Image (cartoon, helix red, strand yellow):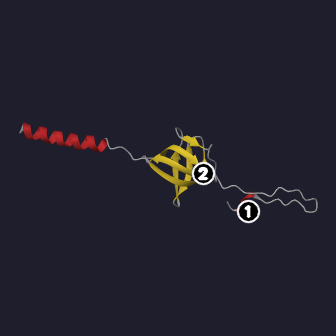
Amino acid sequence: MSKLSSTITFLAASVALFSCSSKSELKDCRAFVNSVTDSVMTATVLGEEKQFDIVEAEFVNGQSLPGDSVNIYYIDEAKMAKAYVVGRVEAASKIVDATHNDHSELLVVDRDSLGN
């Protein structure tokens, strides 16, 4: 009887050990930043809004602001995903012809109308 109970105890401990020691997988995604605070970034990933803990995150190409596209490397956790690296994706440059012409008026275009 003691041999059977020790075998059952060993199997139960093995199952518990392996289920608790499974490591979370590092994931990456491309996202659109909706809002940023000191500790949380809310971003849209594949049409769904997701929150990321950014307290210990490293930022590449500067701090991300609302409206930026970013690549996020993170691990899903119980409450929210924990971001480790957040890389801001640089927007394409706009070419402006800066020649001087006294006979034309200066045209100013709102940035939002350019359609990044």
Q: Is residue 79 left or right of residue 23?
A: right
| Residue position marked by numbered label 2 in the rendering | 89
Above or below residue 114? Residue 90 is: above
Front residue of this view, candidates 27 and 105: 105
Furthest-right residue in this view: 103
SS category of the residue bearing label 2? loop
**Mark sitting on residue 77:** none
Front residue of this view, candidates 6 and 32: 32
Front residue of this view, candidates 69 and 100: 100
Quadrant of the drawing holding the C terminus = bottom right
Residue 80 visible here: no
Local packing at callout 2 (Cα closer than 10 Å; few below 14, some 14-19, many 20+) is some
Q: Residue at x 52, y 49 (%)?
A: 72
Amino acid type, mark 2: Val
Q: Earlier in the sequence, mark 1 or mark 2?
A: 2
Residue 101 visible here: yes
Give the tally of numbered discs: 2
Q: Residue at x 66, y 56 (%)?
A: 92
Could you tell me residue 24's position as x and y percent?
38, 45
Could you tell me residue 76's position as x and y percent?
43, 48
Could you tell me residue 32's position as x and y percent?
58, 55
Could you tell me residue 80's position as x and y percent?
47, 47
Q: Residue at x 56, y 47 (%)?
A: 87
Amino acid type, mark 1: Ser
Furthest-front residue in this view: 99
SS category of the residue bearing label 1? helix
Q: Is residue 19 left or right of residue 33?
A: left
Furthest-left residue in this view: 1
State which mark lies toward you, 1 or 2. Answer: 2
**Mark sitting on residue 113:** 1
Quadrant of the drawing holding the N terminus = top left
Q: Residue at x 62, y 52 (%)?
A: 68
